[in-house]
C-alpha cells in the first residue's frame, strides 16, 4: 500500500484501502502473518526485500513472482528451495502445467473488467504494456477463447 501511495499520490487512503480489500478478497490465501519478527535475522543482498523472502519462507512458497528478479539472487533463494520468476515466465509455466485453469481465470478476469470494460484486444495490450510480451503473444494466438 505504501508503494501505491508513492506511485499515485493523488489517490486517497480510502481508495487504497478499497484496492487492498479487493486484492485480499480476490486471493484470500495471500495473507501471510507472523513473519515480521523473522526479518531481522535474515541476511539478504537488499535489506528492503527481506520481508518478501521471509513471507515466502513462512508461507511455504516455491516461487517469488516479481518483475525485479535481479533483487532475488538464485544462490540466496536456493537455500530455501525458492526461485524468483518474472510474471511472464510464471504465466507461461502455469499455462503449460494448468492450461484449463489459466484460461478460465483469464476469461473471468477479462469479463469482470467493468470500470472500464475492455475488449479482447485491449485486454491483451494490457499484458504487453506490463512487460508480459510472451503472455500477450500467446493470448493473441488464442484470443477467440477469451
Image (cartoon, rainbow, N blue to C red):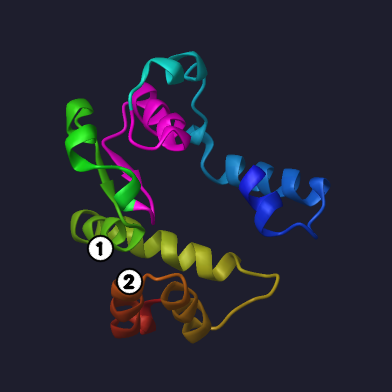
Residue 54's disc number: none
Region in magenta: 44-68
Which residue is located at x 26 percent, y 36 percent? 62
| Left or right, residue 52 beside residue 76 | right
Q: Is residue 101 above or below residue 45?
A: below
Residue 80: percent from left, percent from top: 22, 27
| Left or right, residue 61 beside residue 74 | right
Residue 1 visible at all: no
Instruction: Please tell me how many numbered marks the rendered image carries.
Output: 2
Q: Are the residues tagged 1 and 2 within 8 Å (C-beta)?
A: yes
The span from disc 1 to disc 2 (Cα, nearest Å) is 7 Å
Q: Is residue 111 above or below residue 80?
A: below
Camera-side residue of 86 and 27: 86
Q: Is residue 90 magenta?
A: no
Which residue is located at x 34 percent, y 84 percent? 140
| Left or right, residue 103 beside residue 73 | right
**Which quadrant of the view contains residue 38?**
top left
Which residue is located at x 25 percent, y 63 percent? 92
Name the residue beneath numbered marker 2: 135
Which residue is located at x 45 percent, y 68 percent? 107
Residue 78: percent from left, percent from top: 17, 33
**Callout 2 crowding tier (Cα within 10 Å): few <14, some 14–19, many ≥20:** many
Residue 139 visible at all: yes
Q: Is residue 145 above or below residue 107?
A: below
Q: Secondary structure at mark 2?
A: helix
Camera-side residue of 38 and 103: 38
| Quadrant (top left, top right, bottom left, bottom right) of the N terminus | top right
Q: Secondary structure at mark 1?
A: helix
**Callout 1 crowding tier (Cα within 10 Å): few <14, some 14–19, many ≥20:** some
Q: Is residue 57 magenta?
A: yes
Name the residue beneath numbered marker 1: 92
Amino acid at each position: 500500500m505504501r508503494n501505491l501511495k508513492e506511485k499515485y499520490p493523488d489517490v486517497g487512503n480510502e481508495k487504497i484501502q478499497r484496492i487492498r480489500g479487493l486484492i485480499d478478497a480476490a486471493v484470500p490465501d495471500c495473507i501471510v502473518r507472523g513473519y515480521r519478527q523473522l526479518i531481522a535475522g535474515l541476511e539478504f543482498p537488499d535489506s528492503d526485500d527481506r520481508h518478501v523472502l521471509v513471507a515466502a519462507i513462512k508461507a511455504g512458497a516455491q516461487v517469488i513472482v516479481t518483475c525485479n528478479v535481479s533483487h532475488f539472487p538464485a544462490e540466496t533463494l536456493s537455500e530455501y528451495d525458492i526461485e524468483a520468476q518474472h510474471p511472464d515466465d510464471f504465466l507461461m509455466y502455469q499455462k503449460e502445467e494448468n492450461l484449463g485453469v489459466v484460461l478460465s481465470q483469464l476469461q473471468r478476469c477479462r469479463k469482470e473488467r467493468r470500470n472500464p470494460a475492455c475488449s479482447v484486444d485491449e485486454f491483451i495490450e494490457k499484458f504487453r504494456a506490463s512487460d508480459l510480451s510472451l503472455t500477450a503473444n500467446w493470448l493473441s494466438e488464442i484470443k477467440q477463447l477469451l
